[in-house]
Structures are given as C-alpha cells and as structure tokens.
Image (cartoon, grey):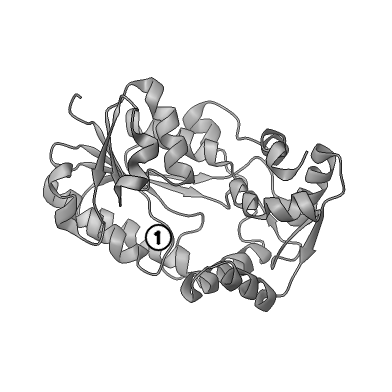
C-alpha cells in the first residue's frame, strides 16, 4: 500500500463508516485508528485503508503511525473522556508534524455553553488553534440517523419520544456530514474554515412524526416527555450518568430553539443540496417498518 495521505479516528462509527465509503472511490490512502482487531474487521479488504490498532488514551499506541501524515480527521464519541482523548490526539499529531486537522465538532460549540458537549468541543477547537494547525471545524446539528435508536418503537408501537417540546431542529443526514468531511480532507480551500452543517429545514419532532406517518403509510406519534423521564430511559438503555445528563442538556438546547437555524454550508462545500428529513425517512423506511 502507498503511504497514507489521511489519518482517521472514529472510523467505525456512523460518520466514520460513511466517510470511508465516500473516500474509497477517490483512491485516497487512509490510516484508520481502531481500538481492537474486532473493530477493524469491517475495514479489512478495503484496498485504500490501513488499520492501526491503538487507544487515544495511550499516545504511544498511535504516535508512530502519524509520521508522514499531513491531514487528520478527529472524531470520538461524546464521553466524559472525550475532551482529554481528543487533546491527546491533537498533541500527538503536533509532535508528528501533522499540518491540518479536520475536526468533527457540534453546532453552536462554545466554551460558555450550558451544554457539556458544546463546551468540550470548543475546548478542543481552541487547543488545535493554540498549537498552530490549519484547521477545518465541522459543526453538524442533530443527526437524522439518531432517530434510528427509536426504530423498534416506531415499527412496533408507532411512536417515539424525547424531552424537546415543540422545539425545532435543522437536523442533518450523516451522509451529508461525511460528504463535507471528504471534501475538506481531499480538496484545497477549506483551511481555517468553520462549517455549520444543517438540514434544509427546521422541524419539530411532531413534524418529523407527520413525515414518518406519510412515508410509512401508518400513524406515527411523537410523545413529548419530561427530562426526568427521558433521563430514566437513557440510563435504562445503558448510557452512563455523564452522557445521559449531557443528552438532557442537549435536548434542552434544542427545546430553546437554539438549533433551528438553516445554513448553506453543505451546498457550498459539496455542490449538492442537503438531504431532507423526508428523503431520510424514505431511504430508511424498511428499518421503521414500511
């Protein structure tokens, strides 16, 4: 395999998987960091992907793999350790001579935000600047694919729920996030840019339910619940306390209409209109019980 051009973290999550799918036809050589051999299995056989087994908590496990890399894509789960893990990576990349970092951040990232996820993303963004990288910050809004966590409820019971009230969110399809990331990793002109990534329209969850009803040809209802009820559901589903509390903060942010703006950055970067929620519902209809 030729020397890799790009180093990817988060390569096996929803965005990372789609990003690799979109990079493959471009014949770009990629090093993908994974935590275990089992995680690497889906990437085996891809001609342009070399897997590196390592842990962001242990710089020594991936430091040498960064040598010769010019561009890196930074993504981790939003865990209590996310900020320290991402800063570990940024500092290792700086020592290795990486020049450009494309970081997956979050819409409205700010050190002064009441939402812990938005605070940690801003802290990492600032560290990247402090170390002198050129950067591209991708700040996507709520993922449409997040609704897939309710697919069993929608398929079997005809409803889904959250603590969001009538708040509208300009949710974005993961496929659009990956398309923007692929462009920023492989094309010039995105240095020191911040892209706010949204879908084409702000929708309440009640309006999303109406779209599901039409697309699936069956009644689908959205049930607004109290934050305490949503938190109990998250804990029962296996989320840790820190992450569950963070998601409650996130949804309070949505309920306050702070994530309803529509931005044109997907179109500006990719040349294509952002995918609508209706198109998302049609494309995934089989999972929701069409």
User: In the rendering, at what x and y percent does residue 102 appear?
Assistant: 34, 43
Which residue is under mark 1? 121
Number of numbered tags placed on the structure image: 1
Tell me: 75 left or right of 162. Answer: left
Towards the viewer: 36 or 28: 36
Name the quarter where the C terminus is drawn: top right
Name the residue rendered at 76%, 62% in the picture.
166
Name the residue rendered at 46%, 43% in the picture.
15
Label 1, secondary structure: give it. helix
Name the residue rendered at 39%, 70% in the picture.
80
The answer to which quarter of the image holds residue 78 is bottom left
User: In the rendering, at what x and y percent does residue 105 appear?
Assistant: 43, 53
Image height of 180 relative to 246, above or below: above
Tell me: 244 left or right of 233. Answer: left
Any part of residue 97 in sight: no
Tell me: 31 left or right of 64. Answer: right
Any part of residue 208 in sight: yes
- Dot 1 alpha-carbon crowd within 10 angstroms: few under 14, some 14 to 19, many 20 or more: many
User: In the rendering, at what x and y percent does residue 145 appear?
Assistant: 60, 46
Towards the viewer: 149 or 243: 149
Image height of 182 relative to 158, above or below: above
Name the residue rendered at 36%, 63% in the picture.
82
Name the quarter where the N terminus is drawn: top left
| Furthest residue toward bottom | 228
User: In the rendering, at what x and y percent does residue 175 appear?
Assistant: 53, 36
């Amino acid at each position: 395999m030729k020397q890799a051009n790009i180093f990817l973290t988060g390569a096996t999550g929803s965005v990372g998987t789609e990003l690799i799918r979109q990079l493959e036809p471009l014949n770009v050589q990629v090093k993908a960091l994974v935590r275990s051999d089992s995680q690497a299995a889906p990437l085996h056989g891809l001609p342009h992907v070399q897997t590196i087994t390592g842990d962001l908590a242990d710089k020594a496990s991936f430091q040498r793999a960064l040598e010769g890399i010019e561009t890196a894509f930074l993504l981790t789960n939003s865990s209590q350790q996310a900020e320290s893990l991402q800063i570990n990576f940024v500092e290792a990349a700086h020592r290795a001579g990486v020049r450009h970092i494309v970081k997956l951040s979050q819409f409205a990232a700010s050190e002064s935000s009441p939402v812990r996820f938005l605070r940690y993303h801003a802290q990492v963004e600032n560290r990247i600047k402090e170390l002198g990288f050129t950067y591209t910050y991708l700040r996507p809004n709520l993922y449409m694919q997040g609704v897939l966590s309710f697919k069993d409820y929608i398929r079997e019971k005809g409803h889904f729920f959250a603590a969001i009230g009538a708040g509208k969110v300009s949710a974005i399809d993961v496929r659009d996030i990956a398309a923007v990331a692929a462009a920023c990793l492989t094309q010039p002109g995105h240095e020191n840019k911040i892209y706010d990534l949204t879908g084409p329209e702000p929708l309440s969850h009640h309006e999303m339910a109406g779209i599901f009803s039409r697309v699936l040809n069956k009644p689908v209802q959205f049930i607004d619940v109290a934050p305490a009820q949503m938190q109990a559901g998250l804990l029962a589903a296996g989320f840790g306390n820190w992450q569950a509390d963070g998601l409650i903060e996130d949804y309070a942010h949505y309920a306050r209409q702070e994530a309803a703006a529509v931005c044109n950055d997907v179109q500006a970067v990719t040349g294509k209109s952002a995918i609508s929620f209706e198109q998302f519902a049609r494309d995934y209809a089989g999972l929701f019980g069409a």
